[in-house]
């Protein structure tokens, strides 16, 4: 599948806000701290006022890049969120949060969602004892996410194992540091997630 492979710091500069796409570097050597202007030669030129639709598009793009989802797949998440009962914006966020690559990141097994996606692709994780190498795999409440034998032999596993005790997890997740296993025990609580985008604005964008 096609995937954005350019410099991700440009995405944060374009959005005008940190999206934390590169893990630890976002806290130590963030480009937006040094160059808080949009990329391009006309970055310092006088800006035009952004329309309402432009603002909605910007929120959607921030969400897409945050979770590493392409447009067609993101629209499918929107359609599923609208079909489900409840608040569509919260449904959308929960669908994105329950992706396997995101769960790996939220459990502290990866420094970023991009790294979590790579680890899943390389067969480092299993769900309920079965190896899963699909980053978009939808995890359910109670599913056990564990490292495979191949994952346990990797260098990243040794690093994570040393650091996992000092990493906290969100209230809707549970982790067992002895066995290096984790699981979602409830649906994600949206206020707890510190989102860098407004999901309700995204719903309005697609509903037009």
Image (tube, helix red, strand yellow):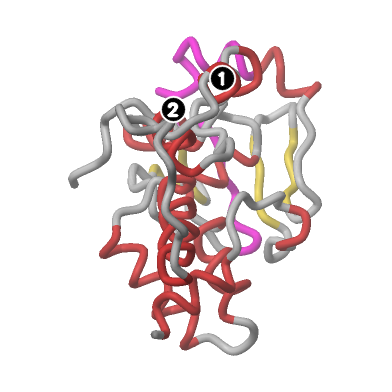
The outermost residue toward the front is: 46
Residue 176: tell me if it is visible: yes
Q: Which residues are magenta?
A: 141-160
On whether residue 158 falls in the magenta region, the answer is: yes
**Mark linked to residue 95:** none
Left/right of residue 10 with respect to residue 26 in the rendered view? left
On whether residue 9 falls in the magenta region, the answer is: no
The outermost residue toward the left is: 2
Q: Are marks 1 and 2 in contact (CB under 8 Å)?
A: yes
Q: Earlier in the sequence, mark 1 or mark 2?
A: 2
Read off the residue under disc 2: 9
User: Element under label 2?
Assistant: helix
Left/right of residue 26 with respect to residue 175 in the rendered view? left
Q: Nearer the viewer, residue 191 or 84?
A: 191
Q: Nearer the viewer, residue 141 or 34?
A: 34
Residue 119: tell me if it is visible: no
Asked if 112 appears above or below 163 in the picture, the reply is below
Read off the residue under disc 1: 30
Instruction: Name which residue lies at 56% across and 80% down.
Output: 88
Instruction: Name which residue lies at 47% across and 67% down.
Output: 56
**Which quarter of the picture shows residue 189?**
bottom right
Instruction: Name which residue lies at 43% across and 40% down.
Output: 14
Asked if 163 appears above or below 142 in the picture, the reply is above
**Which quarter of the picture shows residue 73?**
bottom left
x and y percentages locating residue 165 in the rendered image: 79, 23
Q: Nearer the viewer, residue 100 or 47?
A: 47
Asked if 78 appears above or below 7 in the picture, the reply is below
């Amino acid at each position: 599948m096609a995937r954005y492979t350019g410099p991700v710091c440009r995405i944060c500069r374009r959005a005008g806000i940190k999206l934390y796409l590169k893990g630890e570097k976002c806290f130590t050597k963030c480009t937006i701290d040094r160059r808080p202007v949009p990329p391009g030669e006309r970055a310092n030129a006088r800006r035009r006022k952004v329309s309402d639709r432009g603002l909605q598009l910007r929120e959607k793009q921030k969400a897409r890049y945050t979770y590493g989802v392409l447009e067609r797949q993101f629209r499918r998440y929107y359609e599923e969120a609208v079909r489900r009962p409840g608040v569509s914006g919260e449904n959308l966020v929960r669908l994105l949060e329950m992706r396997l690559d995101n769960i790996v990141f939220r459990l502290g097994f990866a420094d970023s969602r991009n790294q979590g996606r790579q680890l899943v692709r390389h067969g480092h994780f299993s769900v309920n004892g079965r190896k899963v190498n699909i980053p978009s795999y939808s995890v359910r409440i109670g599913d056990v996410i564990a490292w495979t034998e191949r994952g346990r032999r990797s260098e990243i596993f040794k690093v994570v194992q040393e650091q996992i005790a000092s990493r906290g997890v969100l209230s809707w997740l549970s982790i067992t540091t002895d066995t290096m296993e984790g699981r979602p025990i409830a649906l994600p609580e949206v206020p707890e997630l510190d989102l860098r985008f407004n999901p309700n604005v995204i719903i309005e964008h697609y509903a037009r």
